[in-house]
Protein backbone atom coordinates (compact mmCIF):
# COMPACT_ATOMS: atom_id res chain seq x y z
CA UNK A 1 0.00 0.00 0.00
CA UNK A 2 1.09 3.56 -0.68
CA UNK A 3 1.24 5.13 2.76
CA UNK A 4 -0.06 8.59 3.59
CA UNK A 5 3.55 9.71 4.04
CA UNK A 6 4.58 8.38 0.62
CA UNK A 7 1.59 10.03 -1.05
CA UNK A 8 2.27 13.36 0.65
CA UNK A 9 5.93 13.17 -0.40
CA UNK A 10 4.93 12.45 -3.99
CA UNK A 11 2.58 15.42 -4.09
CA UNK A 12 5.22 17.69 -2.58
CA UNK A 13 7.84 16.47 -5.05
CA UNK A 14 5.49 17.06 -7.96
CA UNK A 15 4.93 20.65 -6.87
CA UNK A 16 8.32 21.66 -5.53
CA UNK A 17 10.95 19.61 -7.36
CA UNK A 18 10.09 18.92 -11.03
CA UNK A 19 13.75 18.16 -11.70
CA UNK A 20 13.36 14.99 -9.64
CA UNK A 21 11.57 13.35 -12.58
CA UNK A 22 14.61 13.51 -14.84
CA UNK A 23 16.83 12.34 -11.99
CA UNK A 24 14.52 9.36 -11.47
CA UNK A 25 14.72 8.44 -15.14
CA UNK A 26 18.51 8.59 -15.04
CA UNK A 27 18.84 6.60 -11.82
CA UNK A 28 16.54 3.74 -12.84
CA UNK A 29 18.32 0.40 -12.95
CA UNK A 30 17.58 -0.98 -16.41
CA UNK A 31 17.08 -4.62 -17.20
CA UNK A 32 19.56 -5.92 -19.76
CA UNK A 33 17.02 -7.60 -22.05
CA UNK A 34 13.31 -7.54 -22.85
CA UNK A 35 12.60 -11.23 -22.43
CA UNK A 36 12.80 -12.90 -19.06
CA UNK A 37 15.11 -15.83 -18.46
CA UNK A 38 12.08 -18.01 -19.31
CA UNK A 39 11.77 -16.39 -22.73
CA UNK A 40 8.55 -14.58 -21.86
CA UNK A 41 7.36 -11.02 -21.34
CA UNK A 42 4.51 -10.10 -18.97
CA UNK A 43 3.57 -6.42 -18.72
CA UNK A 44 0.81 -4.54 -16.93
CA UNK A 45 -0.79 -1.70 -18.90
CA UNK A 46 -1.89 1.64 -17.50
CA UNK A 47 -2.22 4.03 -20.43
CA UNK A 48 -6.02 4.11 -20.48
CA UNK A 49 -6.60 7.35 -18.50
CA UNK A 50 -4.66 9.53 -20.96
CA UNK A 51 -7.18 8.60 -23.67
CA UNK A 52 -10.08 9.43 -21.36
CA UNK A 53 -10.94 5.75 -20.89
CA UNK A 54 -11.51 5.73 -17.13
CA UNK A 55 -14.26 3.15 -16.73
CA UNK A 56 -14.07 -0.45 -15.62
CA UNK A 57 -17.24 -2.49 -15.54
CA UNK A 58 -20.09 -0.52 -13.99
CA UNK A 59 -17.80 2.17 -12.54
CA UNK A 60 -17.22 4.95 -15.11
CA UNK A 61 -14.46 6.53 -13.00
CA UNK A 62 -12.62 3.48 -11.68
CA UNK A 63 -9.26 4.57 -13.10
CA UNK A 64 -9.72 8.22 -12.15
CA UNK A 65 -8.36 7.66 -8.63
CA UNK A 66 -4.63 8.03 -9.26
CA UNK A 67 -3.47 6.89 -5.83
CA UNK A 68 -5.53 3.71 -6.18
CA UNK A 69 -4.21 3.10 -9.71
CA UNK A 70 -0.59 3.50 -8.61
CA UNK A 71 -1.13 1.25 -5.62
CA UNK A 72 -2.61 -1.45 -7.86
CA UNK A 73 0.29 -1.13 -10.29
CA UNK A 74 2.86 -1.46 -7.53
CA UNK A 75 1.04 -4.54 -6.23
CA UNK A 76 1.20 -6.10 -9.71
CA UNK A 77 4.86 -5.18 -10.18
CA UNK A 78 5.79 -6.93 -6.95
CA UNK A 79 4.94 -10.28 -8.53
CA UNK A 80 8.26 -11.74 -9.76
CA UNK A 81 6.62 -12.99 -12.97
CA UNK A 82 5.61 -9.45 -13.96
CA UNK A 83 8.41 -8.06 -16.11
CA UNK A 84 7.31 -4.45 -16.30
CA UNK A 85 4.77 -1.83 -17.22
CA UNK A 86 3.33 0.06 -20.18
CA UNK A 87 2.18 3.60 -19.52
CA UNK A 88 2.06 7.29 -20.38
CA UNK A 89 4.67 9.74 -19.03
CA UNK A 90 2.60 10.82 -16.02
CA UNK A 91 2.06 7.26 -14.78
CA UNK A 92 5.61 6.11 -15.54
CA UNK A 93 7.09 9.12 -13.76
CA UNK A 94 4.95 8.61 -10.66
CA UNK A 95 6.04 4.98 -10.50
CA UNK A 96 9.64 6.13 -10.88
CA UNK A 97 9.23 8.64 -8.05
CA UNK A 98 7.75 5.85 -5.92
CA UNK A 99 10.87 3.78 -6.66
CA UNK A 100 8.85 1.04 -8.34
CA UNK A 101 10.55 0.48 -11.70
CA UNK A 102 14.09 -0.70 -11.00
CA UNK A 103 15.04 -3.81 -13.02
CA UNK A 104 11.71 -3.68 -14.84
CA UNK A 105 10.90 -3.34 -18.54
CA UNK A 106 9.29 0.06 -19.18
CA UNK A 107 7.37 0.70 -22.40
CA UNK A 108 6.21 4.25 -23.13
CA UNK A 109 2.75 4.78 -24.62
CA UNK A 110 2.92 7.15 -27.58
CA UNK A 111 -0.44 8.03 -29.19
CA UNK A 112 -3.28 8.95 -26.86
CA UNK A 113 -4.94 11.68 -28.92
CA UNK A 114 -7.86 9.55 -30.08
CA UNK A 115 -9.97 10.32 -27.04
CA UNK A 116 -12.51 7.65 -26.19
CA UNK A 117 -15.90 8.56 -27.63
CA UNK A 118 -14.67 11.63 -29.52
CA UNK A 119 -15.76 12.29 -33.11
CA UNK A 120 -12.08 12.18 -34.13
CA UNK A 121 -11.25 9.06 -32.08
CA UNK A 122 -9.72 7.16 -35.00
CA UNK A 123 -7.37 10.02 -35.87
CA UNK A 124 -5.13 8.98 -33.02
CA UNK A 125 -2.47 11.70 -32.76
CA UNK A 126 0.82 11.12 -30.95
CA UNK A 127 0.48 13.17 -27.78
CA UNK A 128 2.65 11.33 -25.23
CA UNK A 129 6.14 9.87 -25.63
CA UNK A 130 7.95 10.03 -28.95
CA UNK A 131 10.89 7.89 -30.06
CA UNK A 132 13.55 10.42 -29.11
CA UNK A 133 12.21 10.91 -25.57
CA UNK A 134 11.85 7.15 -25.07
CA UNK A 135 15.53 6.80 -25.98
CA UNK A 136 16.60 9.85 -23.96
CA UNK A 137 14.81 8.71 -20.82
CA UNK A 138 16.20 5.19 -21.05
CA UNK A 139 12.93 3.36 -21.64
CA UNK A 140 12.82 -0.01 -23.37
CA UNK A 141 10.39 0.68 -26.20
CA UNK A 142 7.29 2.47 -27.36
CA UNK A 143 3.72 1.32 -27.85
CA UNK A 144 1.25 2.67 -30.39
CA UNK A 145 -2.46 2.01 -30.89
CA UNK A 146 -3.61 1.52 -34.48
CA UNK A 147 -7.38 1.29 -34.88
CA UNK A 148 -8.25 0.42 -38.48
CA UNK A 149 -11.64 1.65 -39.72
CA UNK A 150 -12.06 1.40 -43.48
CA UNK A 151 -14.91 3.92 -43.48
CA UNK A 152 -13.01 6.54 -41.44
CA UNK A 153 -10.28 8.62 -43.09
CA UNK A 154 -8.80 9.26 -39.65
CA UNK A 155 -7.15 5.88 -40.06
CA UNK A 156 -4.78 7.29 -42.69
CA UNK A 157 -2.79 9.80 -40.56
CA UNK A 158 -2.65 7.28 -37.73
CA UNK A 159 -1.20 4.67 -40.09
CA UNK A 160 1.40 7.12 -41.31
CA UNK A 161 2.34 8.26 -37.81
CA UNK A 162 2.68 4.69 -36.58
CA UNK A 163 4.92 3.80 -39.53
CA UNK A 164 7.15 6.77 -38.74
CA UNK A 165 7.32 5.82 -35.07
CA UNK A 166 8.26 2.22 -35.92
CA UNK A 167 11.13 3.50 -38.08
CA UNK A 168 12.33 6.01 -35.47
CA UNK A 169 12.27 3.51 -32.62
CA UNK A 170 14.23 1.06 -34.77
CA UNK A 171 16.90 3.70 -35.34
CA UNK A 172 17.42 3.72 -31.56
CA UNK A 173 17.34 -0.10 -31.38
CA UNK A 174 14.13 -0.03 -29.33
CA UNK A 175 11.01 -2.17 -29.41
CA UNK A 176 8.06 -0.81 -31.38
CA UNK A 177 4.92 -2.39 -29.94
CA UNK A 178 2.04 -1.98 -32.42
CA UNK A 179 -1.53 -2.72 -31.35
CA UNK A 180 -3.64 -3.11 -34.53
CA UNK A 181 -7.37 -3.32 -33.87
CA UNK A 182 -9.98 -3.55 -36.64
CA UNK A 183 -13.19 -1.65 -35.94
CA UNK A 184 -16.48 -0.91 -37.68
CA UNK A 185 -19.18 1.59 -36.79
CA UNK A 186 -22.61 0.20 -35.99
CA UNK A 187 -25.90 1.76 -37.01
CA UNK A 188 -25.64 4.23 -34.13
CA UNK A 189 -22.11 5.25 -35.12
CA UNK A 190 -20.49 3.45 -32.20
CA UNK A 191 -17.12 1.81 -32.79
CA UNK A 192 -17.27 -1.97 -32.44
CA UNK A 193 -14.17 -4.18 -32.35
CA UNK A 194 -14.16 -6.85 -35.06
CA UNK A 195 -13.02 -10.08 -33.41
CA UNK A 196 -13.35 -12.46 -36.34
CA UNK A 197 -10.20 -14.15 -37.59
CA UNK A 198 -10.26 -12.53 -41.04
CA UNK A 199 -10.38 -8.99 -39.62
CA UNK A 200 -7.70 -9.67 -37.01
CA UNK A 201 -5.40 -11.39 -39.52
CA UNK A 202 -5.74 -8.45 -41.88
CA UNK A 203 -4.94 -5.99 -39.10
CA UNK A 204 -1.89 -7.98 -37.99
CA UNK A 205 -0.63 -8.12 -41.57
CA UNK A 206 -0.96 -4.35 -41.98
CA UNK A 207 0.84 -3.65 -38.70
CA UNK A 208 3.69 -6.04 -39.52
CA UNK A 209 4.54 -4.07 -42.66
CA UNK A 210 4.76 -0.62 -41.06
CA UNK A 211 7.99 1.37 -41.12
CA UNK A 212 11.25 0.96 -43.01
CA UNK A 213 12.23 -2.11 -40.99
CA UNK A 214 10.36 -4.67 -38.89
CA UNK A 215 13.48 -5.70 -36.97
CA UNK A 216 12.24 -4.24 -33.68
CA UNK A 217 8.48 -4.58 -34.20
CA UNK A 218 6.28 -6.55 -31.82
CA UNK A 219 2.52 -6.96 -32.16
CA UNK A 220 0.00 -6.55 -29.34
CA UNK A 221 -3.12 -8.48 -30.29
CA UNK A 222 -6.45 -9.62 -28.81
CA UNK A 223 -6.71 -13.31 -28.02
CA UNK A 224 -8.42 -14.68 -31.15
CA UNK A 225 -10.90 -17.53 -31.13
CA UNK A 226 -8.73 -19.20 -33.80
CA UNK A 227 -5.15 -18.36 -32.81
CA UNK A 228 -3.44 -20.00 -35.78
CA UNK A 229 -5.59 -18.22 -38.35
CA UNK A 230 -4.45 -14.86 -36.97
CA UNK A 231 -0.99 -15.48 -35.55
CA UNK A 232 0.30 -17.45 -38.53
CA UNK A 233 0.22 -14.23 -40.59
CA UNK A 234 3.68 -13.12 -39.44
CA UNK A 235 6.87 -14.26 -37.75
CA UNK A 236 6.95 -11.15 -35.57
CA UNK A 237 6.81 -11.71 -31.79
CA UNK A 238 3.40 -11.04 -30.31
CA UNK A 239 1.88 -10.29 -26.94
CA UNK A 240 -1.73 -10.99 -25.97
CA UNK A 241 -3.70 -8.01 -24.73
CA UNK A 242 -6.38 -8.17 -22.08
CA UNK A 243 -8.94 -5.81 -23.57
CA UNK A 244 -12.20 -4.97 -21.82
CA UNK A 245 -12.53 -7.38 -18.87
CA UNK A 246 -15.45 -9.79 -18.96
CA UNK A 247 -17.64 -10.57 -15.98
CA UNK A 248 -15.98 -13.98 -15.72
CA UNK A 249 -12.20 -13.72 -15.20
CA UNK A 250 -11.86 -17.45 -15.77
CA UNK A 251 -13.08 -16.95 -19.34
CA UNK A 252 -10.43 -14.28 -19.91
CA UNK A 253 -7.73 -16.59 -18.56
CA UNK A 254 -8.83 -19.46 -20.79
CA UNK A 255 -8.84 -17.20 -23.85
CA UNK A 256 -5.32 -15.92 -23.12
CA UNK A 257 -4.06 -19.46 -22.56
CA UNK A 258 -5.12 -20.68 -26.01
CA UNK A 259 -3.18 -17.89 -27.72
CA UNK A 260 -0.14 -18.18 -25.45
CA UNK A 261 0.52 -21.66 -26.84
CA UNK A 262 1.23 -20.26 -30.30
CA UNK A 263 5.00 -20.12 -30.97
CA UNK A 264 5.06 -16.44 -31.96
CA UNK A 265 3.36 -15.35 -28.74
CA UNK A 266 5.77 -14.44 -25.96
CA UNK A 267 3.52 -13.17 -23.23
CA UNK A 268 0.83 -10.84 -21.97
CA UNK A 269 0.03 -7.13 -21.74
CA UNK A 270 -2.93 -6.85 -19.39
CA UNK A 271 -4.42 -3.74 -17.80
CA UNK A 272 -7.87 -3.38 -16.32
CA UNK A 273 -8.60 -7.11 -16.11
CA UNK A 274 -5.79 -7.52 -13.58
CA UNK A 275 -5.72 -4.10 -11.96
CA UNK A 276 -9.49 -4.01 -11.31
CA UNK A 277 -10.63 -7.63 -10.98
CA UNK A 278 -14.26 -8.27 -9.93
CA UNK A 279 -13.14 -9.89 -6.69
CA UNK A 280 -10.87 -6.94 -5.86
CA UNK A 281 -7.71 -8.97 -5.19
CA UNK A 282 -5.08 -7.57 -7.57
CA UNK A 283 -2.29 -9.84 -6.35
CA UNK A 284 -4.43 -12.94 -6.86
CA UNK A 285 -5.52 -11.83 -10.34
CA UNK A 286 -1.91 -11.22 -11.37
CA UNK A 287 -0.77 -14.57 -10.02
CA UNK A 288 -3.59 -16.35 -11.88
CA UNK A 289 -2.47 -14.74 -15.14
CA UNK A 290 1.16 -15.63 -14.40
CA UNK A 291 0.13 -19.24 -13.86
CA UNK A 292 -1.67 -19.32 -17.21
CA UNK A 293 1.47 -17.97 -18.89
CA UNK A 294 3.69 -20.53 -17.18
CA UNK A 295 1.35 -23.39 -17.99
CA UNK A 296 0.88 -22.41 -21.64
CA UNK A 297 4.64 -22.09 -22.18
CA UNK A 298 5.50 -25.25 -20.23
CA UNK A 299 7.46 -23.35 -17.58
CA UNK A 300 7.90 -25.22 -14.27
CA UNK A 301 6.95 -23.33 -11.12
Image (cartoon, rainbow, N blue to C red):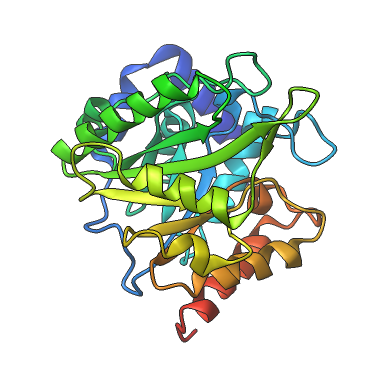
Horizontal arrangement in the rendering, residue 256 relative to residue 157 (left or right): right
Horizontal arrangement in the rendering, residue 266 relative to residue 175 (left or right): right
Q: Is 37 above or below relative to 243?
A: below
- Residue 2 seen by the camera: no
Q: Give me the residue at 29% from left, 48% from top.
A: 217
Q: Nearer the viewer, residue 153 or 237?
A: 153
Q: How many labels does the image show?
A: 0
Q: Is 190 above or below relative to 296?
A: above
- Position of residue 257 measured from the top left corner of the image (x, y, whole percent): 59, 71
Q: Quadrant of residue 64?
A: top right
Name the outermost residue toward the right: 58
Q: Give me the residue at 46% from left, 86% from top.
A: 300
- Position of residue 260 measured from the top left corner of the image (x, y, whole percent): 51, 70
- Residue 86 seen by the camera: yes
Q: Is 200 above or below relative to 18?
A: below
Q: Give me the residue at 49% from left, 32% from top.
A: 91
Amino acid sequence: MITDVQWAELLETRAADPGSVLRAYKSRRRRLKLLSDKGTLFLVAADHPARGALGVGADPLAMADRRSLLDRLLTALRNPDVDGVLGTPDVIEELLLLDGLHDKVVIGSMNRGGLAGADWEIDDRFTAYDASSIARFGLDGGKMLLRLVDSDAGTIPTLESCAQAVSELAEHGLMAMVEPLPYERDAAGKLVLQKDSAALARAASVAAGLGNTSAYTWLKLPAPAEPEAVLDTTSLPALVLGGVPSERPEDDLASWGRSLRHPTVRGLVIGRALLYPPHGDVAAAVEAAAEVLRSARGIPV
